[in-house]
Image (tube, rainbow, N blue to C red):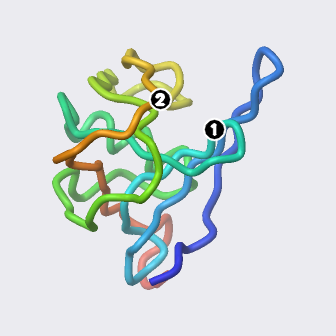
Amino acid sequence: MSCIPFFAIYTGNGTSIRIRLGSGTIPTEGRVEVLYDSVWGSIVDDNWDINDANVICRQLGFAEATSSTAQFGNGKGPVYMTDMECSGSEVNFLDCWYTHVIEEVDGRQDVAVECQPTEPGMF
């Protein structure tokens, strides 16, 4: 299934990073995918919780997360982040603490979210 094109862009220090939700059946759900250096990758679920999911959902223009444990399979690209820890109040997911990695990981569990739409009946 193709990825639904909902993007958020962060530009800082000359680097542009984008996020989107992939493999969901509606725009408010899916695997969290990160575009870095022109390659789509993912975030591994170590320490992933509802606070992290809330930051991602809000940054993508949705309301709070309804689930941080959704499963939409693993992406095909590298893992860019692991051990993400957000307080839940961050505006940008890059303001959260995380370990930055660029590698292929066997047996990984990529993070996914289910977000509430900003308006009831939106999707």
Question: How many numbered dots are placed on residues in this image?
Answer: 2
Establish if 115 lies above or below 51: below
Task: Locate residue 11, reporting x and y percent.
Answer: 76, 29
Residue linked to disc 2? 102
Q: Which residue is depicted at the point 29% across and 49% down?
A: 111
Q: Secondary structure at mark 2?
A: strand
Task: Give residue 52's mark.
Answer: none
Task: Locate residue 39, reporting x and y percent.
Answer: 63, 47
Q: Residues within 10 Å of mark 2 (few under 14, many from 20)?
A: few
Task: Locate residue 104, reporting x and y percent.
Answer: 37, 40
Q: Which residue is depicted at the point 28% across and 34% down?
A: 51
Residue linked to disc 1? 36
Establish if 52 lies above or below 76: above
Q: Earlier in the sequence, mark 1 or mark 2?
A: 1
**Rounded to the nearest whole Å, what is the CA distance between mark 1 and mark 2?**
10 Å
Instruction: Name the residue type under label 1.
Output: Tyr
Q: Is residue 71 left or right of residue 40?
A: left
Residue 85, quarter of the rendered image: top left
Q: Is residue 74 left or right of residue 26?
A: left
Q: Is residue 16 left or right of residue 111?
A: right
Circles 1 and 2 in contact, beta carbons < 8 Å: yes
Residue 15, quarter of the rendered image: top right
Instruction: Name the residue type under label 2.
Output: Ile
